[in-house]
Image: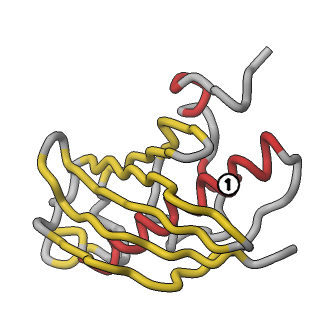
Amino acid sequence: MIDYEHPSEEFLRTIDIHTLLPQQEPFVMVGTLTHFERTRIKTELVIPETNIFVNDGRFSAAGIIENMAQTCAARLGYINKYILLKGIQLGFIGALRDMEVVDLPKVGETITTEVVIREEVFGMLLADATVKCGERLIAKTEMKIAEKEG
């Protein structure tokens, strides 16, 4: 029996990320869910050459922002599908604060995105997002996400 509140990384890696997100190809910017807690989630993405946000062999800042937002969406999708037994829910970036893009990852590199939830109230989410490539910091920001009801 799987404990969906405390799933193993092995189980999470078997989930088709498309089943957790409202976005579909070619606009999917996360690859694999690797960690889930109610207040912390991690995803990985190997940057494909065919990604719509790749320019001159590098993943753009716009792609990084969307990757962060979709990591939040994967969290909500996981909660809805495996814990609340509901469908996919839409969310929207309300604001980015103190956004810092340090580097743009290259095609073929794997980025790991971690989102830590600071507050969640009335369909609004305040979170810190960090993107790394190995130990190298790629980007970080504070995000406000609005979740659409229904």
Comparing 23 with 67, the one in front is 67
Q: Residue at x 75, y 78 (%)?
A: 148
In the displayed structure, 99 sits above or below 47; it is: below
- Label 1, residues with CA under 10 Å away: few <14, some 14-19, many ≥20: many
Label 1 sits on residue: 20
User: Farthest residue in the top direction?
Assistant: 1
Q: How is the image coloured?
A: secondary structure
Quadrant of the frame with the C terminus? bottom right
Q: Residue at x 34, y 67 (%)?
A: 50
Q: Residue at x 28, y 50 (%)?
A: 111
Q: Position of residue 126 (x, y in %)?
A: 51, 68
Quadrant of the frame with the N terminus? top right
Looking at the rendered structure, the secondary structure element under dot 1 is loop
Quarter residue 145 falls in: bottom right
Q: Position of residue 117 (x, y in %)?
A: 51, 55
User: Farthest residue in the bottom direction?
Assistant: 94
Q: Residue at x 70, y 31 (%)?
A: 5
Comparing 60 with 54, the one in front is 60
In the displayed structure, 2 sits above or below 33; it is: above
Q: Position of residue 90 (x, y in %)?
A: 70, 74
Quarter residue 4 falls in: top right
In the displayed structure, 66 sits above or below 48; it is: below
Q: Is residue 38 left or right of residue 57?
A: right
Comparing 53 with 101, the one in front is 101
In the displayed structure, 140 sits above or below 100; it is: above
Q: Is residue 109 left or right of residue 129?
A: left
Q: Position of residue 118 (x, y in %)?
A: 49, 58
| Number of marks | 1
Comparing 135 with 31, the one in front is 135
Amino acid at the residue labelled 1: Leu
